Amino acid sequence: MNDNGRMGNESVWTPAFSPWIIAATMVLPTFMVALDTSVANVALPHIAGSLSASTDEATWMLTSYLVANAVILPATAWLSGLFGRKRFLLLSIAVFTVSSGLSGAALTLDMLVFARVVQGASGGVLLPISQAILLESFPPEDRGQAMAAFALGVIVAPIVGPTLGGWITDNYTWRWVFYINLPVGVMALLMTQTFIEDPPYIKRISRREIDYAGFVLMAVGLGALQVILDKGQEDDWFAAPWIRWFAFVSGASLIAFVIRELKAKRPIVDLRILRDRNFTVGIVIAVAYGAILYGTLLILPLFLEDLMDYSALQSGLTISPRGIGAMISVAVAGRMIKKIDARIMMIGGFLMIAWAGFLFGRINLEIAPFDVAFPNIVLGSAIGFVFVPLTTISMGMLAKEKMGTSTGIYNLMRNMGGSVGIAVITTILARSSQKYQSVLVSHLTPYDRSFVQAYDRLHSFFLSKSDPVTAAGLALGAIYRDLLDQSTLLAYVINFRLLGILALICIPFVFLFKSEKKGEKTTGGGNAVD
């Protein structure tokens, strides 16, 4: 095996059970964890009220989950070697299930935040382990179908999460948002114990080889970065001293971590895997793709609920066609990838994402539900044609024993891309709204004919119901509320168009992928192509 983690004639290992049984087994924990990234968001106001906390305080329930998730993701392969992968997978599923129950039973916000930290840490390892097991269990020519199965959990779950969370919260209680994980977790445990096995090339590492310093540097660096991204907009970014300190600590820790991992004999994260060009290009695109995916998942419900006055359930139902499009596209992409160059599929997918972004960029305050549903179908259909080939080609030239490391890094970078995208979108939304408000308010003068006509019409209406002074105030208030809605609408439009532009920017990077040459198919997960 060469330094890039590729192998020319590695021994071929095949699992004892059908790859499709293994896929069904791994979809369960994948769906459960991915669902928890979004299902609790819509219940946030209910959770805050129930636990006597403000909404801002309750957001730590979300932040704590993301921080723990980010810290644990890149260490997945190392932890699998420490405990044994199957044993570690079973432990993670069990801990995630128990912590879900504790989250639902929380009596205070502190208890909920603690349970969410445990949930995020245990859930963080389930996605890369599941993805690695799928990539190893399927032969190279069928890995596209393996990633299609994986996509059903990791992509569709966050899409249906807000709808499911809104329905549960409206009809039952927010606690059932977490309790629904209990039967799924038990089923996942039973199926994992029965059908999953450790391949022979996963080597156990001794406790004497634990790189404690590397783990601490990674945890501090990624944890501080995630807190900055999640809380930065609330405190005006670098205008806040704590943001500057956290940025310094994060930057210094991550630089020290990279240096240590490159020199360590037993690194927690084998960064040498980045020598593989396809993998490196893949995680660069995954960052942008994560920003688009999670950015639209954030911005659309906000638009529908804040400006269109939709309920959480109505918002989720309007967005749900994206899930239908995604389920169809991942199934089609899993079959098409055997016949079509993965790069062509990705280009088509990014063009569809850009189209959806520009369709959303034409919204106004008088749109019908179909005007939101149709671009969502386009966006959902594009997701499969990006996710499946991107994952497949990114890891297509890596040896099987490198799958654990590669999936950990890949999922971390996609999630961090989502965090960066959400942070940028919320910042642009707030500041663009202020900018457009200052521009539009300049037209509210006695010299603007449209303003005068609107004011006179409203003043006459309110005058029939109150005195002249009150009517004047109500008329100006109504006009100002319309101005706020229009300025916020323009900020949403800018964000949607920027997401479309970002999708177009991804297309040139697709050409940097090295295509697999004929006659050089991988055998067991790697090849000798340089």
Image (cartoon, helix red, strand yellow):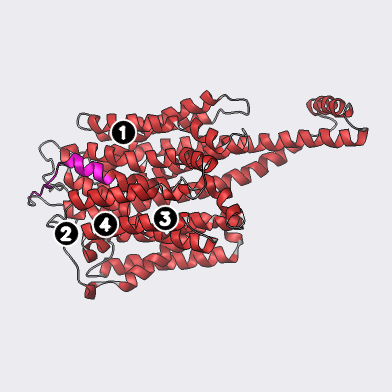
Task: Check disc 4 and report the residue beneath it.
Answer: 90
Q: Is residue 310 visible?
A: yes
> Which tag, 2 or 3, sits closer to the chain's start?
3
**Residue furthest toward the bottom?**
208
Say whether residue 292 is magenta: no
Task: Check disc 2 and report the residue beneath it.
Answer: 202
Q: Position of residue 316 (x, y in %)?
A: 50, 35
Above or below — where is 38 with respect to 74?
above
Task: Point out the frontmost of discs 4 and 1.
Answer: 4
Q: Quadrant of the N terminus?
A: bottom left
Residue drawn 56% across and 40% down? 302
Q: Position of residue 191 (x, y in %)?
A: 23, 48
Task: Point out the frontmost of discs 2 and 4.
Answer: 4
Q: Is residue 229 visible?
A: no
Q: Nearer the viewer, residue 372 or 30?
A: 30
> Which tag, 2 or 4, sits closer to the chain's start?
4
Q: Nearer the viewer, residue 141 or 520?
A: 141
Amino acid at pointer 1:
Val
Task: Check disc 1 and report the residue beneath it.
Answer: 330
Label 2 Cα crowd, 10 Å radius (few <14 / some 14-19 / many 20+):
some
> Which tag, 2 or 1, sits closer to the chain's start?
2
Q: What element carries label 4?
A: helix
Residue drawn 13% across and 35% down? 518
Q: What stretch is highlighted in magenta?
A: 12-26
Task: Check disc 3 and report the residue beneath it.
Answer: 101
Task: Point out the frontmost of discs 3 and 4.
Answer: 3
Amino acid at pointer 3:
Gly
Compute the Cα span from label 2 to label 1: 30 Å
Q: Position of residue 459 (x, y in %)?
A: 86, 29
In the displayed structure image, the side of residue 349 where residue 232 appears, left or right: right
Amino acid at pointer 4:
Leu
Label 4 Cα crowd, 10 Å radius (few <14 / some 14-19 / many 20+):
some
